[in-house]
């Protein structure tokens, strides 16, 4: 299994609204696209005073990840839906992709 961990550094004062748009608008679209969101939320600490959030997703293979993300981020639903509400609040982000066992993914699931 492939686990993608994405962290977001958010623009000042946007964390609460970023999380609302993520929860109420982006996550339902991700689910509809068949993307397995394992966990998401706010960081418990602000790094260097910056609000931060995370998104953890699981995929069966690297190829499936590439295909699903290309389809999702290229879709009209994303572009005409929550994209602006998400992207406008991000100052920067970082993604890592690792191999993980099913047990590790289950342990992270929220």
Image (cartoon, helix red, strand yellow):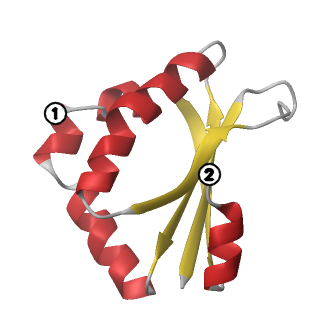
Which residue is at the far top? 13
Identified at 23% across, 43% down, the residue is 78
Which residue is at the far left? 76
Q: Helix, strand, or loop for circle 1?
A: helix
The reply, left or right, for residue 6 in relation to residue 104 is: left
> Which x, y percent locates residue 87?
42, 34
Q: Earlier in the sequence, mark 2 or mark 1?
A: 1
Residue 63: which quarter of the image? bottom left
Residue 88: which quarter of the image? top left
Residue located beneath label 1 in the image: 80
Who is closer to the viewer here, 7 or 19?
19
Identified at 24% across, 59% down, the residue is 33
User: Which disc is residue 45 wearing?
Assistant: none
Q: Which corner quadrant holds the N terminus?
A: bottom right
Mark 2, residues whose alpha carbon is within 10 Å: few (<14), some, or many (≥20)? few
Who is closer to the viewer here, 82 or 25?
25
Mark 1, residues whose alpha carbon is within 10 Å: few (<14), some, or many (≥20)? few
User: Which disc is residue 110 wearing?
Assistant: 2
> Which x, y percent locates residue 70?
27, 66
Location of residue 81 with respect to 77 vertically, above or below: above
> Which of the two marks, 2 or 1, is nearer to us in this view?
2
> Which x, y percent locates residue 47?
85, 35
Q: Helix, strand, or loop for circle 2?
A: loop
Identified at 29% across, 64% down, the residue is 34
The alpha-carbon separation of the residues under discs 2 and 1 comes to 28 Å
Q: Say if residue 18 shows up in the picture.
A: yes
């Amino acid at each position: 299994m492939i686990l993608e961990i994405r962290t977001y550094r958010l623009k000042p004062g946007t964390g609460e609204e970023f999380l609302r748009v993520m929860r109420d608008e982006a996550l339902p679209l991700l689910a509809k696209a068949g993307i397995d969101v394992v966990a998401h939320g706010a960081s418990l600490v602000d790094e260097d005073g910056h609000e931060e959030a995370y998104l953890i997703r699981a995929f069966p293979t690297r190829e499936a990840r590439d295909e699903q993300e290309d389809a999702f981020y290229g879709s009209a639903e994303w572009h005409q839906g929550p994209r602006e509400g998400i992207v406008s609040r991000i100052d920067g982000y970082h993604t890592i992709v690792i191999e993980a066992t099913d047990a590790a993914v289950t342990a992270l699931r929220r």
